[in-house]
Amino acid sequence: MDEGRRGVVMGKAIILSETGGGLYKIRPLYDTTKYDKELSKLQEQESAYAALLLKTINTLNLLKDDSAIAEAAYNAVIEQWKNDLISKENSTAPSLTPDPENDPETGLPWVDPDRAQESPLFDLINAYRADHSLDPLTRDSDLDGVCRVHLSNQAATGETGHIGYNQSTPAERVLYVGYSALSVEELLKYGTTSPSATLAGWKRTTAYVNALLSSTATAAGVAYKYAPKNPATHLWCVLIVQPDPDPPPVTTYTFPPDPAKKAGEEEQDKLNRIEAPHTDPDVPNGLQDVVKKYAEAKLKEQAAQKDYEKLLAEKIARVARITEITARKAALAALSIDCWCATYTLGLAVGKEVATMEVPGFYIDAYQQTSATIDAGTTSERVVVYNERSLNIAPAGSNFAPHGKLRLTDSISPPAVFYHLALEPGHYKWKPYCRYGIITALDKNSGTCSLTLNATECRKLQSEKDAFDLNESATLTNVLIVYPPCNIAAFEVNDEVLVKFTGFDRTKPTVVGFRRLPRDCKKRFSWAQFV
């Protein structure tokens, strides 16, 4: 498509090679500015969203695990109920008996009896690792604190799962205390009443086994919380961490909002507005709570899954568009087409930028394979086969309209494309710029000719049967021939020529060159003919 709205009516091209006789290989130049801007934006989005997608996947995995944890808590309450640990008279379970009875660090009774359960669990984990020929983990007090704060919040709120206070993830909670880690795995268990039962439950989950038996992790945090207000009652947490020996510098980069986390928050807001169903009085309150938490966890997981799938679909579409634009630009850069100079011009340098004339005013990629004899009557005479299009290199030194790069329709806004295509037939019929025609008569005295214009139709849709005729009149008379230095002397009847309409005025046609096989004035005429 030409850039007529900016006054540009001719294209540009780069000379790739010279065939001979005025025939060249050229590469039409296209304005890819919009492509470049779109590609830059897409690549920027892809860079950001690649990290966001990974973050979303991690959040979704946490929410999936939260669902499994909530289900396990539900089952634990059922088991407690069955064993009369929870009854109508007592809906909470007794605390675990500290073992040992006194704090080994002080030799005194436990200030916080919950701490008595942590070392036995930690020792069991290292024993499990030893069974698999792995080095023991080192317990870290900062990581212990992260676990304890998380469980304390859940004890107060009745929540379960990895998503904690202020919608924080395990990795974020570790980072909040200033601990730099390469990897963070959080193991949670609800309802089990001993360290051994807790570890046994984790050993039944592949992801937890992989975390417990990590060959790269070296540090751990451990916590237990007796929580009468939490339906699960007994809360366990372990962090398995690979410390970062060389913490990265602080960055100011901010990720876009995590859609999976946001979806979970929105779903929780919806659920908070729903009144919990009233259960049978024979059913313990704890059971009602864990059922509610399990339902909430599943709904948050489902909401996050939808947003993850949407984000993934956007990523797939974005990558496809990047591939499409890159391929389109590569195809444009690889173009090589045959093109005749309208005048006999030799020696155009490779890489030179030239103006082109697209007939009848817009570029048509359709071509017809044909042949021509160049340098006829000389020792260089030869037949060349080429693909002929409605395109010529503009005559050198002529006063032609401004030229610019071509543009593809999909690099222009849809309204602009519609505007151009709607105006195009009328514009090129009543305000023509160039045409091909056949000379029918010559008047050497006046330097003019008569000619018949080639049939020229507007562009049409595949569904359209008839095309709009762009020629207001097929026959033209008294057409001036401008072909320096010999002008009309270079032409013969039946020559197919290039016609330009000065000032887009259909009453001012001028023959400015040949469609193909331009003639050399120097070879055809002597100086005497110009005296």
Image: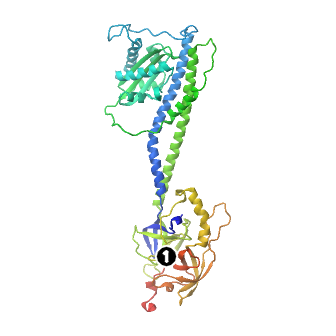
Residue 308 versus residue 22 in the image, above or below: above
Instruction: Check the picture and name the quadrant holding the N terminus.
Output: bottom right
Q: Residue at x 52, y 31 (%)?
A: 265
Q: Position of residue 433 (x, y in %)?
A: 55, 73
- Residue 216 in view (yes/no): no
Q: Position of residue 459 (x, y in %)?
A: 61, 65
Q: Nearer the viewer, residue 379 or 170?
A: 170
Instruction: Check the picture and name the quadrant holding the C terminus.
Output: bottom left
> Residue at the front extreme?
273
> Residue at the right extreme?
465
- Residue 347 in view (yes/no): yes
Residue 250 versus residue 356 in the image, above or below: above
Residue 269 versus residue 202 in the image, above or below: below
Mark 1 lies on a secondary structure that is loop
Q: Position of residue 120 (x, y in %)?
A: 39, 14
Q: Residue at x 46, y 10 (%)?
A: 95
Name which quarter of the figure residue 504 lies in: bottom right
Q: Nearer the viewer, residue 417 or 439?
A: 417
- Tell me the kind of residue under disc 1: Ala
For residue 238, side relative to residue 502 (left or right): left
Q: Position of residue 432 (x, y in %)?
A: 57, 73
**Colour scheme employed for the rendering of this structure:** rainbow
Name which quarter of the figure residue 450 lies in: bottom right
Q: Residue at x 63, y 75 (%)?
A: 472
For residue 178, side relative to residue 517 (left or right): left
Q: Nearer the viewer, residue 166 or 351?
A: 166
For residue 424, side relative to residue 339 (left or right): right
Name which quarter of the figure residue 366 lies in: bottom right
Q: Which residue is mark 1?
A: 342
